[in-house]
């Protein structure tokens, strides 16, 4: 890993776009304002839009004002940060841009001295990943003889198994695998990272974290929003590609992995890869039993009418793209044999919530035979967003002369305990890449394993285009979702 004091240059491709405006520069500003960003640094933005350095800085300041976790205290502090922002316009598919980038980097590195550390961020449409990677290689910008050189590639990393394999092959022909950081912003969330701390820093949970005590594991990412004007993108993606193939499978691996020997990036990523190797493949004839999809129709969200997916801008009138998807997975290893893992995600659902639910086995024998007795199993709930925290649901006797047992919740919330607002996901992930820590980034083999698991589902759904089951906007998904999980005696937790 690099020293935290090393200077570096960050080149953002697609710097005039929405991701840089809303996420990347606000995250970098918050790191700078919190005095955790290594200095000196230079941020070089590039894009097809023509603008001056000053226009670039003014545009980014508006994004920082609106989206950054830490606000701008005064013009002097912003001025020091903005002095490190440079803009180089150009076509990312042609060689001319890369000559100008090399010149800009050489000027910066000669002026400040020290190692020539470079981080490239591909904040562009995936269709440009191939061209940018090739051009960086041809221009000699992928070498790291005078310092470290790394590249961050945004998701989606491939559209299917074949395209992911081809992209991996191209990227690793220009950069070494240890130079490549495939980002999944979901792993930068504080509560996701705390899954590892909860498991491996507390002796109380790990002895119970297996098939002898756990009946079922649920992962839910529910959103109240629709496609938010991104109908064209969502038509190509769908819920399975957009959320499950990357975010939810990553979180599942953190929950299911074996304890690594050390908290070393290689050891952690090896254990995550072993989980994917152990997931039972879904045969084509078993897709309908292992996967469920649906599409939202018109309904009400927060007492306001919401259109159906087919009425959204950019969506085909006969679209068979799923806006809800659920999977039932089995992990065939000693720890998890026989324990179903359920993953579900959907748009226009009843509530915005992301959480992990560990459902434990019921007591083998209920000795209380009189009074009102709870039949609910114990649950461990890890809330990723909103109201980040952890809840343990247990049974307790209610006060009074009668024997009445009901579930109660033992709960802690991060904000109440630690105070303040947690860092944004991109803050942690950008800092990790600068420091050379790939623990929370995806390795190439993991990406291909995730596509290999989901490819039979995508192929089957492509052969059976619809019509899809529906659910009203504002509901908890399709009616079939309850039957889908009830086969194992479970029910979806609905906060």
Image (cartoon, helix red, strand yellow):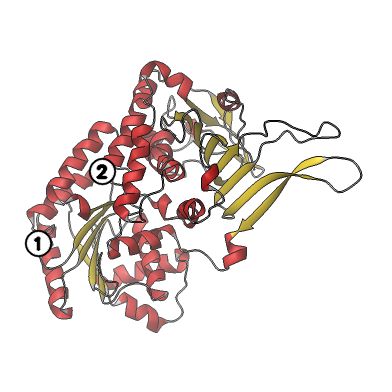
Is 127 placed above or below 117 here? above
Which is more foreground, mark 2 or mark 1?
2
Give the spatial CA distance, label 2 vs label 1: 29 Å
Circle nearer the N terminus (2, 1): 1
Name the spot of residue 453 as percent of width and height, x first.
35, 30
Task: From the top left corner, tell me how far across and down residue 2 is, in percent.
Answer: 25, 67
Q: Position of residue 55 (x, y in %)?
A: 30, 70
Q: Residue at x 54, y 37 (%)?
A: 218
Image position of 360 (left or right of 311): right
**Do the residues under discs 2 and 1 have CB atoms within 8 angstroms?**
no
Q: Quadrant of residue 164?
A: top left
Tag 2 secondary structure: helix
Toward the viewer: 144 or 120?
144
* Circle 1 Cα neighbour tier, 10 Å, few/some/many (<14 / 14–19 / ≥20): some
Q: Quadrant of the N terminus?
A: bottom left
Q: Is residue 184 above or below residue 71?
A: above
Name the quadrant of the C terminus: top right
Q: Residues within 10 Å of mark 2 (few under 14, many from 20)?
A: many
Horizontal arrangement in the rendering, residue 432 relative to residue 299 (left or right): left
Residue 185: image x %, image y %? 39, 52
- Residue at position x 86%, y 49% in the image: 399
Horizontal side of 63 relative to 165 (left or right) equals right
The circle drawn on residue 99 is 1
Does residue 155 appear in the picture of this structure?
Answer: no
Look at the numbered disc 1 and give the secondary structure of its residue: helix
Q: Residue at x 32, y 71 (%)?
A: 57
Query: On the image, which quarter does residue 316 sit in?
Result: top left
Q: Which mark is residue 444?
A: 2
Nearest the eye: 449 or 209: 209
């Amino acid at each position: 890993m690099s020293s935290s004091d090393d200077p570096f240059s960050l080149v953002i491709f697609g710097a005039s776009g929405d991701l840089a405006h809303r996420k990347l520069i606000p995250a970098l500003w918050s790191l700078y304002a919190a005095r955790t960003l290594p200095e000196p640094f230079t941020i070089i933005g590039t894009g097809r839009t023509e603008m001056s350095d000053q226009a670039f800085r003014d545009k980014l300041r508006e994004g920082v004002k609106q989206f950054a976790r830490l606000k701008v205290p005064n013009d002097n502090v912003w001025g020091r940060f903005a002095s490190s922002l440079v803009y180089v316009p150009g076509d990312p598919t042609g060689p001319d841009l890369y000559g100008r980038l090399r010149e800009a980097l050489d000027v910066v590195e000669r002026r400040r001295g020290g190692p020539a550390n470079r981080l490239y961020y591909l904040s562009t449409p995936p269709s440009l990943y191939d061209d940018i990677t090739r051009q960086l290689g041809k221009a000699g910008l992928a070498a790291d003889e005078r310092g470290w050189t790394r590249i961050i590639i945004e998701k989606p990393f491939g559209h299917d198994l074949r395209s992911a394999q081809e992209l991996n092959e191209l990227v690793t022909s220009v950069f070494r695998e240890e130079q490549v950081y495939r980002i999944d912003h979901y792993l930068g969330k504080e509560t996701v990272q705390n899954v590892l701390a909860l498991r491996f820093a507390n002796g109380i949970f790990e002895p119970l974290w297996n098939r002898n005590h756990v009946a079922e594991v649920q992962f839910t990412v529910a959103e109240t929003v629709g496609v938010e004007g991104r109908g064209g993108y969502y038509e190509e993606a769908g819920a399975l590609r957009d959320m499950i193939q990357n975010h939810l499978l990553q979180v599942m691996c953190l929950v299911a992995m074996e304890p690594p020997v050390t908290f070393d990036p290689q050891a952690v990523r090896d254990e995550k890869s072993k989980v994917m190797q152990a997931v039972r493949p879904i045969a084509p004839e078993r897709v309908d039993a292992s996967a469920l999809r649906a599409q939202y129709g018109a309904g009400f969200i927060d007492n306001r009418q919401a259109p159906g997916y087919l009425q959204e801008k950019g969506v085909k009138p006969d679209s068979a793209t799923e806006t809800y998807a659920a999977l039932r997975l089995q992990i065939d290893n000693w720890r998890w044999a026989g324990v179903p893992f359920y993953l579900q995600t959907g748009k226009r659902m009843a509530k915005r919530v992301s959480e992990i639910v560990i459902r434990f086995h019921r007591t083998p024998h209920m000795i209380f035979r009189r009074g009102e007795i709870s039949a609910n199993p114990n649950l461990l709930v890890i809330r990723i967003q909103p109201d980040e925290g952890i809840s343990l649901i247990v049974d307790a006797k209610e006060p009074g002369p009668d024997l009445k047992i009901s579930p109660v919740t033992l709960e802690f919330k991060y904000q109440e305990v630690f105070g303040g607002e947690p860092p944004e996901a991109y803050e942690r992930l950008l800092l990790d890449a600068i420091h050379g820590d790939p623990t929370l980034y995806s390795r190439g083999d993991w990406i291909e394993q995730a596509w290999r698991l989901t490819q039979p589902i995508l192929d089957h759904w492509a052969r059976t285009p619809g019509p899809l089951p529906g659910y009203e906007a504002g509901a908890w998904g399709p009616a079939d979702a309850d039957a889908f999980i009830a086969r194992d005696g479970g029910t979806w937790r609905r906060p």
